[in-house]
């Protein structure tokens, strides 16, 4: 007679049914998606260490990875982990990877940019603070003003997803942005055959998915979507494209990408560069990449700009234009501090407000507090547009007709400006010419 299967306790029974980690990730507002350890409710990263296990093996402790603190590793396995971590720098033998090829010229004094990045607005002298604001206002009135037009378009390929009422505000926001960008491509007659659509900073590939879907619907079999991103992400949307040959994903940092050596781009006659979310310096890295020698086949650029506070002087393409207006590295750093006022309320953290209050008591009111919230928001907006206009000047100097447009309403996103650029004489730059 077969022996009876021993009964499981309630705790063991619950653990046996668990396949994914039950740890709640506050930052992402969801449970961890990693597989749970056998007989446990948690994965290795979130399994709580008991006092008994710590006494037996102090090395059971998990510590943040020195290369990327977003994940942790067992202390006893740190040495091995550093040799295989995805965040490690690996010398590449790929012909299209050249370290810092698009990073801009090295600064004469590299420590200067690091020092400038640590500037605090409330510690600036009045003369310097208001001098930068005056320069920004003058440049804005002369070159930007109210001349940015609305270009609110939609693409038919997203009508069905946008009709789902169950989608939340965040999901709908991204769909509206993707629809608007594809609508601009269609309006400017860029959805053509024999074209490589290169999405820089592609992330999980939502924009690329809908673009590939649109190309497939139009039977543009000789076109392709090439995704560029430095990270290898899970749950990529581009994996769901029906025709897998339409999409190519390249893992590379934009700063290191030599477009002319990318073999995938040799399959088509022209390139279109686009992006839905390129943080700060990544926009400048992309422009340098697209305009580099040998990459002149790019006829059209469509970049939704954002996160100007993450711009850097070394990579910024509009340096010469700003310098001609009397704005150097230090003033540039001050401007990148003020841009956040356009989208982040007061633009002042709790710690900064506390420091300001103390300064007010001891030395009098700091300069930032003499501006109303409306004034700060206006100045932040002007700072953003000045940085973008410097990019336009660089593109125009390189043979492009360039402009800024509001591509979605402000209630969709406050970062609602897109940079458009068309090569003045695209026929002379085709790959087969």
Image: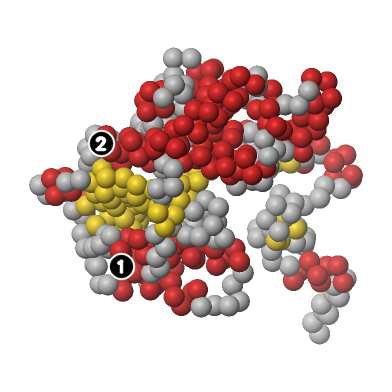
Instruction: Give the image location of residue 199, x and y in percent.
Output: 38, 52
Q: Secondary structure at mark 1?
A: helix
Residue at (70%, 61%) from the top-left corner? 30
Mark 1–mark 2 contact, CB under 8 Å? no
Instruction: Give the image location of residue 44, x and y in percent.
Output: 71, 51
Q: Quadrant of the N terminus?
A: bottom right
Structural crowding at the residue carrying mark 2, measured as other residues with C-alpha within 10 Å and reported as few (<14), some (14–19) or many (≥20): few
Q: Is residue 404 left or right of residue 164?
A: left
Residue at (44%, 21%) from the top-left corner? 326
Instruction: Give the image location of residue 129, x and y in percent.
Output: 60, 24
Residue toward you, 385 or 135: 135
Residue at the disc numbered 2: 398
Residue at the disc numbered 1: 215
Q: Nearer the viewer, mark 1 or mark 2?
A: 2
Residue at (70%, 52%) from the top-left corner? 27
194 is higher (above) or lower (below) than 72: below
């Amino acid at each position: 007679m077969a022996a009876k299967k021993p009964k499981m306790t309630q705790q063991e029974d619950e653990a046996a049914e668990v396949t994914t980690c039950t740890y709640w990730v506050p930052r992402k507002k969801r449970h961890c998606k990693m597989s749970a350890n056998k007989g446990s409710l948690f994965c290795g990263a979130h399994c709580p260490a008991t006092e008994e296990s710590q006494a037996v093996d102090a090395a059971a402790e998990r510590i943040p990875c020195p290369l990327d603190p977003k994940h942790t590793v067992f202390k006893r396995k740190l040495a091995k982990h550093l040799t295989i971590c995805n965040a490690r720098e690996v010398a590449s033998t790929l012909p299209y990877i050249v370290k810092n090829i698009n990073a801009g010229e090295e600064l004469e004094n590299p420590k200067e940019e690091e020092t400038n990045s640590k500037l605090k607005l409330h510690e600036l002298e009045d003369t310097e603070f208001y001098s930068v604001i005056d320069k920004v206002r003058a440049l804005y009135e002369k070159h930007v003003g109210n001349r940015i037009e609305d270009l609110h378009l939609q693409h038919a390929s997203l009508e069905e997803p946008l009709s789902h009422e169950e989608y939340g505000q965040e999901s709908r926001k991204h769909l509206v942005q993707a629809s608007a960008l594809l609508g601009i491509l269609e309006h400017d007659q860029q959805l053509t055959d024999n074209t490589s659509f290169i999405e820089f900073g592609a992330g999980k590939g939502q924009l690329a998915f809908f673009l590939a879907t649109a190309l497939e619907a139009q039977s543009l079999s000789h076109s392709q979507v090439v995704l560029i991103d430095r990270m290898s992400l899970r749950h990529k949307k581009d994996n769901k494209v029906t025709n897998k040959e339409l999409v190519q994903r390249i893992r590379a940092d934009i700063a290191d990408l030599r477009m002319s050596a990318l073999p995938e781009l040799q399959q088509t006659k022209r390139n279109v560069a686009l992006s839905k979310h390129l943080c700060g310096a990544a926009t400048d890295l992309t422009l340098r990449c697209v305009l580099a020698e040998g990459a002149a086949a790019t006829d059209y650029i469509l970049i939704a700009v954002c996160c100007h506070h993450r711009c850097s002087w070394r990579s910024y393409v509009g340096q010469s234009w700003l310098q001609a207006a009397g704005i150097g590295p230090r003033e540039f750093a001050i401007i990148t501090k003020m841009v956040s006022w356009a989208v982040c309320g007061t633009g002042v953290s709790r710690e900064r407000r506390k420091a300001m209050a103390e300064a007010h008591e001891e030395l009098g009111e700091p300069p930032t507090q003499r501006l109303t919230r409306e004034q700060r928001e206006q100045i932040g907006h002007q700072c953003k547009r000045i940085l973008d206009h410097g990019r336009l000047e660089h593109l125009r100097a390189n043979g492009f007709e360039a402009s800024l447009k509001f591509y979605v309403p402000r209630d969709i996103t406050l970062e609602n400006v897109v940079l458009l650029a068309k090569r003045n004489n695209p026929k002379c730059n085709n790959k087969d010419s």
